[in-house]
């Protein structure tokens, strides 16, 4: 196994003793997933736009999702995005989400990466 400059082999992480290992693996999975997206693709562009937003404008409108059923999730997302006083950047993200061609391309890009990894990006309700 190759080593990376400044690091060495890490011991196996036991979920029972390594605090936050599940979150660490989620972060690593997300980083790998993003790294495999086409850099000039639809999803990569949308993610860059989302990352450029200032979270303060959204924090006051975010509440925990109550249900992950697609209809419930749609209503939950709309409660965050569809409100008075959104920024121009937020409006652009909403417009991107409503553009069928952009979304279809992003779905295909995500699906391709999930197939490469053999792992699906999925929402999971926390308690």
Image: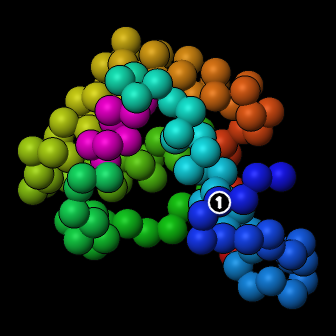
Residue 52 screen position, x and y as percent: 24, 53
Q: Residue at x 37, y 41 (%)?
A: 47
Numbered-mark total: 1
Q: Secondary structure at mark 1?
A: loop
Residue 57 falls left or right of residue 101? left
> From the viewer's perspective, is residue 3 above or below residue 105?
below
Q: Quadrant of residue 12?
A: bottom right
Residue 70 visible to the viewer:
yes
Q: Residue at x 40, y 29 (%)?
A: 39
Q: Residue at x 15, y 45 (%)?
A: 89
> From the viewer's perspective, is residue 101 above or below residue 50?
above
Frontmost residue, 25 versus 72: 25
Q: Residue at x 23, y 55 (%)?
A: 53
Q: Quadrant of the C terminus?
A: bottom right
> From the viewer's perspective, is residue 74 above or below residue 84?
above
Residue 86 falls left or right of residue 63? left
Q: Quadrant of residue 24?
A: bottom right
Residue 11 screen position, x and y as percent: 86, 75
Q: Main secondary structure of the magenta part?
A: helix
Q: Which residues are magenta?
A: 43-50
Residue 102 screen position, x and y as percent: 36, 19
Residue tagged by mark 1?
4
């Amino acid at each position: 196994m190759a080593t990376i400059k400044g690091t060495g082999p890490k011991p196996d992480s036991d979920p029972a003793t390594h605090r936050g290992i599940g979150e660490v693996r989620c972060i690593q999975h997300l980083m790998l997933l993003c790294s495999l997206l086409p850099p000039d693709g639809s999803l990569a562009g949308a993610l860059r736009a989302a990352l450029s937003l200032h979270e303060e404008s959204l924090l006051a409108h975010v509440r925990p999702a109550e249900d992950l059923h697609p209809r419930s999730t749609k209503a939950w997302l709309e409660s965050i995005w569809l409100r008075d006083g959104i920024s121009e950047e937020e409006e652009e993200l909403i417009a991107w989400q409503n553009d069928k061609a952009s979304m279809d391309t992003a779905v295909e890009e995500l699906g391709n990466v999930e197939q490469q990894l053999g792992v699906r990006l999925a929402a999971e309700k926390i308690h």
